Each structure stands twice: as structure tokens, then as C-alpha cells.
Image: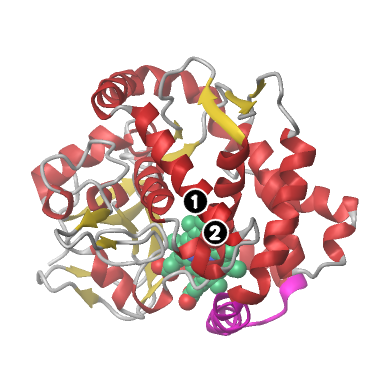
Amino acid sequence: NEPPLVPYRYPIIGHTYDFLFNTENFLKECKEKYGDLFSIYILGSVKTIAGADCAPEVFKYDTFDFVTAIDKTFPMMTIFNHFVGNYSNSYVAQVVHEQIGSKLDIYTSRMQKELLFGIENIIGDCKEPKAFRNIKKVLTQIVAKPVANILFGEEAAQFKEFMNSITAVSNKSRWNPLSPYRDIFVQYYKPIVEERIRQRKKNGRPELCKEIYEEQLKIHNESNGNLSTKDVDKMVKLDSFLKKSVRHSAPIVELPHTNNGESFKFSSGTTIPKGREVFVYMKDVHFNPKYYGETSNDFQPKRHIISLSNSKIINSPIRKVDRTFIMFGGGKHACPGRAFAINEIKICFHKLILRYNIRTESGKIIPPERVGYLSLPSNSGLVFENRD
Ligand code: HEM
């Protein structure tokens, strides 16, 4: 009683090309035809794709293991075992929970200091507008030092050579060889860009920038520029904007999990054998009308904030993992480092927004570049201009 195997024509190759270069349409068609759980044939092996209904089970049951699946794609453990020793995954998760996630109060001011240092050194004053093309590299350089400061200690972060290697590792993509195919994606994503431009006109971006800026300014004034974790929690509009952005730029399909146990029966009755890799169809979760209504595809940055009639505000923060938002996984193996990561991202954005007007060089919304089913920030250029 296996999930239906999508028919294919060529041995070994099977669906590899469509999976890598036509991911969005290919998976959409498969789901429409074969239902929420189906299998495809990639480079000679069968992989199962779990849509929004089955994804929670992949996160919930211990039989599914992310580390085994990732290690098959890129033998991280084999390579890094030498450096990290034989610590089990659950031990690492526990350490991150105990030493980082629950001690954010201790780290926030250090993080803030290092972020301001990075912004000053790398983006600088920008009295004259300055365009940065490789925005991924710029942001990696800015966040590398605070991350190193907290994970490796204040001393380590002072060594330039150490920082250079952290930045290099963070920038490295195991999908580099796919970059020649970028043109195909640009062509493929043109209709999506056009749709986003249409949405931008409808949603009035300048007002949004103003609202987010005003929120940051208020928090900055109230905290005298020295943020605590509570101040970071007050950044509700920024949080919602980030959550929405993350949903739009997340991979179409990712988070492979290997079934390490015996055969596994989904609640739908479908069974997969031992050793089967199950990929989560993230786009089906992040854009599902069942969770986000008919406008699930629209970029509505305030979607995750609800204003009640008694002027109270409820927001569904980016750190909350549930069946509707799986950027950090889900269930008991959900990312234990997410509170730390989000804190850093929010403080970094807070400081950047306070200091600069930031826009794309063309003034248009630039979608991420899709490399296979992954997303990378576009290199088309972001302009930073000092607000003064
Ligand atoms: C924006 C940044 C991050 C994203 C998007 C992210 C995402 C994820 C995802 C999707 C998982 C897999 C969950 C699963 O098995 O289903 C995961 C696991 C994990 N992450 Fe993160 N993560 C981020 C930052 C961090 C940071 C900064 C740390 C450490 C300080 C961290 C530590 C871990 C650990 C230890 C696990 C394994 C948890 C377990 O197996 O129980 N992550 N992360």
C-alpha cells in the first residue's frame, strides 16, 4: 500500500530533471493528480513527497530522521565528526536549548554591540546612497561576528582569520554547480515576479516601510537604544513581515527525513518502507488555502497580526512552529536554535531600519533566485541610504 509512484519514462533519470528545474509546476501537478502523499524517482531512487496533510506526521514520529537524510545528500557527519566528536543529535539539541535558547537575556546586549560594529564597518555611513549587490555576503559578514561571539566566545570573534573562515563556510552552497541553470529559472519565474509587482501596487509598500520604521523608532526610544529580549518581543510588525518574507522565500520542497524504523503507516493508511526518504512539500504547507485562505499567495506582511476590537493585538510570531509554518521544522525536533536565530535577525533588521532607507536598485520587488528547489537572495542590488 505504498504512495502512488508518479510514472516516468527514462530509467535512472526518472523525475530528476523536473524535480530540480521545474519543481514548482511539477510538484503541483503531481499533488493534483496523486494526492497529498506520492513518490517520485530521483537518480535511481524512490523519494516520497509529503504535502501539508502528511507533513506533521513526518515531524511528529521519531522514525523519521533529518540527520540521516541530510547525511546521505552531503556526508556532513562523516566530515565533521573529526571536529565535533561523537555527540548525539539529541545531546546537541539539548545543549542549544539549555545554553542558548534559554539564556538569550545574557546574549542580547553582546549581540547588539557586535551587530552595530558590523553594520558600521560593512555598510557604513551611506550619506550618499550605496548599492550592495551580493546582499547575502553583506549580511553574512554582519551576522558572523555576533554568532561567533555567542557560540565560540567573545575572544574568538576578535580573530580576523577565524571570522573569515566562518563567513566563508556560511556562504558556501552545496548547490553551486547548478548556477549555470539560473537563466532557466529567471525565465520560469517571470510570471511570478509580475504577480508580485501587481501585489506590491495593491499593498502599498511605502506605508508598510513607514509603519515598520515607526515601530522600531518607538522601541529604540523606549529602550534608549539598549535592547532587552522583551523589547525584541515588542517588534510585532517586523516579526510578521519577516515571517511572511520567510514563507515566500522558503524552498519549495526540503527537509528530507529518512524512515529509520520498519515500514511506516501514515494515518491515511499509506505505507512507506524502511530507509525511504520523505521530503516535505514546504510550499504546499506555506501557501495552503486551508491555513491561509484564498489570498494565501499574496504578500500581506501583516497577515500574522490580528487586531482585536478591544485594541489588543494577537500575533503568531515567527518562532512559533505549527502545522502552518515549518521553516524551523516541527514536533520535538523543531529547531532549538530558532529563538536565538530570530533574535539576531530581528535586532539586525531593527538597527538597519533605524539607520537606513533600504530599497531595491530598480525600485521593484525582486523575488529570490530559485536554484533547483532552493531559494537564494537575488544579486540585483539593495541600496542603503542614511536616513539623515
Ligand atoms: C534561520 C536560522 C535557522 C533555521 C531556518 C533552522 C532550521 C532548522 C530545521 C528546519 C531543523 C530540522 C528540524 C527537523 O528535524 O525537522 C533544525 C534543526 C536543528 N537546528 Fe536549526 N535552524 C536555524 C538556526 C539554528 C541555530 C542558530 C542553531 C544553533 C545555535 C540551530 C540548531 C539546530 C539543532 C541542534 C537542530 C537539531 C534538532 C533535533 O534534531 O532535535 N539552528 N533547524
**What numbered label is drawn on residue 1?**
none
Q: Which residues are magenta?
A: 82-103
- Judge whether 238 appears above or below 59 on screen: above
Judge whether residue 90 is colored magenta. yes
Q: Is residue 146 left or right of residue 299?
A: right
For the stretch drawn in magenta, the main secondary structure is helix
| Residue identified by numbered label 2 | 222
Measured Cα–Cα span from mark 2 to mark 1? 6 Å
| Residue identified by numbered label 1 | 218
Q: Is residue 71 visible?
A: no
Near-viewer residue (120 or 280): 120
Q: Is residue 253 left or right of residue 362?
A: left
The quadrant the C terminus occupies is top right
Neighbours of disc 2 within 10 Å: few (<14), some (14-19), many (20+): few
Near-viewer residue (145 or 239): 239
Near-viewer residue (93 or 133): 133
Residues tagged 2 and 1 counted as in contact (Cβ below 8 A): yes
